[in-house]
Amino acid sequence: MVPLGISSAAAVRVGQAIGRRDPQGAADAGGSAIFFGALFMTVAGVALLLFPRAIARLYTPDAAIIRSTVLLLAAGAAFQLFDGIQTVATGALRGAGDTRTPMLCHFTAYWISACPWEPGSVSAKTWEPSDVGGLSLALILIGIVLLFAWRRTVRKLSAAV
């Protein structure tokens, strides 16, 4: 939820800067938002890696479930940074008036790339902790692509001055 809030703020701040014809302000607003979203999610990822058992124990005393949860939290930690980047970059791009790029990235990465490989979308087999690959990869790809899209948008804004 924190990156989503930062994303909304980025959309407003970028849009306001563009409205006042301040491309550097728009670049700074979007860049700082992406940085703070990435920073928060990096800290969250580190917490998932450092305290997985404590987090799992908040929900259950069952040792088998805690063991499985530790694996899942490690997988979750792996994509926290990219999830923060993609969430905030989506807001920054929206503020710049680009809603198409995030939509196409999300559609392609989730529906075309990830869903066919996720077990729940192709069968009703029992879920295993190793089954998180497709969606994790999609988040990582979206984060990288939207970061490059934001950089491209900043260059366009700067060239329009």
Image: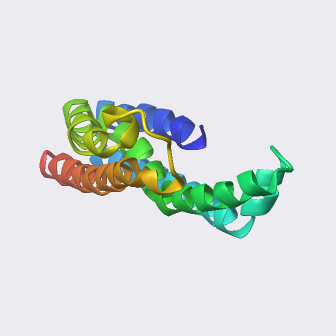
Above or below 13: residue 67: below
Quadrant of residue 119 within the rendered picture: top left
Residue, far front: 125
Q: Position of residue 12 (x, y in %)?
A: 44, 31
State left or right for residue 146 relative to residue 161: right
Can residue 105 be seen here? The reply is yes
Which of these two is toward me, 18 or 1? 1
Q: Residue at x 49, y 41 (%)?
A: 126
> Going by the picture, which residue comes out furthest to the bottom?
50
- The image quadrant that residue 111 belongs to is top left
Q: Nearer the viewer, residue 67 or 136?
A: 67
Kindly identify the residue that appears in the image at 44 percent across and 37 percent down. Answer: 13
Which coloring applies here?
rainbow
Residue at left offset 35%, top offset 45%? 26
Numbered disc total: 0
Q: Is residue 38 at least partly visible in the picture?
A: no
Residue 45 picture location, percent across and down? 60, 61
In this picture, residue 3 sits left or right of residue 26: right
| Quadrant that contains the N terminus | top right
Q: Quadrant of residue 72?
A: bottom right
Q: Nearer the viewer, residue 72 or 122?
A: 122
Q: Position of residue 18 (x, y in %)?
A: 30, 36
Instruction: Give x and y (percent) for residue 40.
Output: 60, 56
Name above or below for residue 124 compared with residue 155: above
